[in-house]
């Protein structure tokens, strides 16, 4: 069975999970963190090498201040509580998203997680934090434009490949599979460049209910699809567009 090396997940439905149980939204987010722990532990055994999760979007700042504060607290707790286990299990942590303007303690934790686990190889856990696909593309365009203005880069030399290398996901292959929970059928500004050729699987379960079985189900659906990349079929996976 073909297994995607890189799976990305839009972890959706925490609030609705809590509402259906008469619980506060924070309870849903806490249950979502536990679902993330289980997914990270399951991924290597299913043949996944890269797991990207949409933890906090650049649009999430518009939520009520109390909920944003709760989410920041959960992020801090996750890193402080789980970082040692992740490191011991050989998980490398990468953070993508805009870190400018983040509180110093948050930035410090993100830097610590990346530095401590940099040499690990069993799984790369990519956490999209303060991330938006359009924002990433704009920041990358600005970076390349500045390099051109400084004479460090020839504008004609900019290609899809060189653009991809300048993205937050530099060195990470594009996801072959993107999963979204909760039954919503959209990408919501997640990995817009990187997901250009990804297979999409939408599951009806809310994220706190997501299990190893749900992940395996999505992998089975992926294995049954033919990936043509604009061709006529029968292409080897190695012929797919190169990742940045």
Image (cartoon, rainbow, N blue to C red):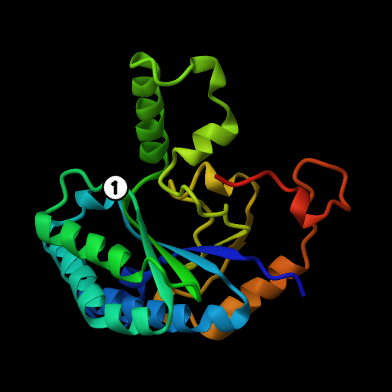
**Looking at this view, is 95 or 27 the one in front?**
95
Please state if 102 lies on the left or on the right of 113 as rendered: left
The N terminus, quarter of image: bottom right
Residue 25 appears left or right of 163 = left
Up the image or down, 76 lies above or below 134; here it is below
Residue 7 as seen in the image, left or right of residue 104 = right
Q: Nearer the viewer, residue 147 or 191?
A: 147
Counting from the top left corner in percent of width and height, residue 116 is at 29, 70
Where is residue 229? Give x, y as percent. Answer: 75, 45
Q: Quadrant of residue 111?
A: bottom left
**Mark 1 sits on what residue?**
59
Residue density around tag 1, few if under 14, some if 14–19, many if 20 or more, within 10 Å = few
Whether residue 20 appears in this view of the structure is: no
Residue 177 place in picture, x, y as percent:
61, 61
Element type at mark 1: loop
Indicate the quadrant where residue 129 lies. Answer: bottom left
Q: Is residue 72 above or below residue 103?
A: below
């Amino acid at each position: 069975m073909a297994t995607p090396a890189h799976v990305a997940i839009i972890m959706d439905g925490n609030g609705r999970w809590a509402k259906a149980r008469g619980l506060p939204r924070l309870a849903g987010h806490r249950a979502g963190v536990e679902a993330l722990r289980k997914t990270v532990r399951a991924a290597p055994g299913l043949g996944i090498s890269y797991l990207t999760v949409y933890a906090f979007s650049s649009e999430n700042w518009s939520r009520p201040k109390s909920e944003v504060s709760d989410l920041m607290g959960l992020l801090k707790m996750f890193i402080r509580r789980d970082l040692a286990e992740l490191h011991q299990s050989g998980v490398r942590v990468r953070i993508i998203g805009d870190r400018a303007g983040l509180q110093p303690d948050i930035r410090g934790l993100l830097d610590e997680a990346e530095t401590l686990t940099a040499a690990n190889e069993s799984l790369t856990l990519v956490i999209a934090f303060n991330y938006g696909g359009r924002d990433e593309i704009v920041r990358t365009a600005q970076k390349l434009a500045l390099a051109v203005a400084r004479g460090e880069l020839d504008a004609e030399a900019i290609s899809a490949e060189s653009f991809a290398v300048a993205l937050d996901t530099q060195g990470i292959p594009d996801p072959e599979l993107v999963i979204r929970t909760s039954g919503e059928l959209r990408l919501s500004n997640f990995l817009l460049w990187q997901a250009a050729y990804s297979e999409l699987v939408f599951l009806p379960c809310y994220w706190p209910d997501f299990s190893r079985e749900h992940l395996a189900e999505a992998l089975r659906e992926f294995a049954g699809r033919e990936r043509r990349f604009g061709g006529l079929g029968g292409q080897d996976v190695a012929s797919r567009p190169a990742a940045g």
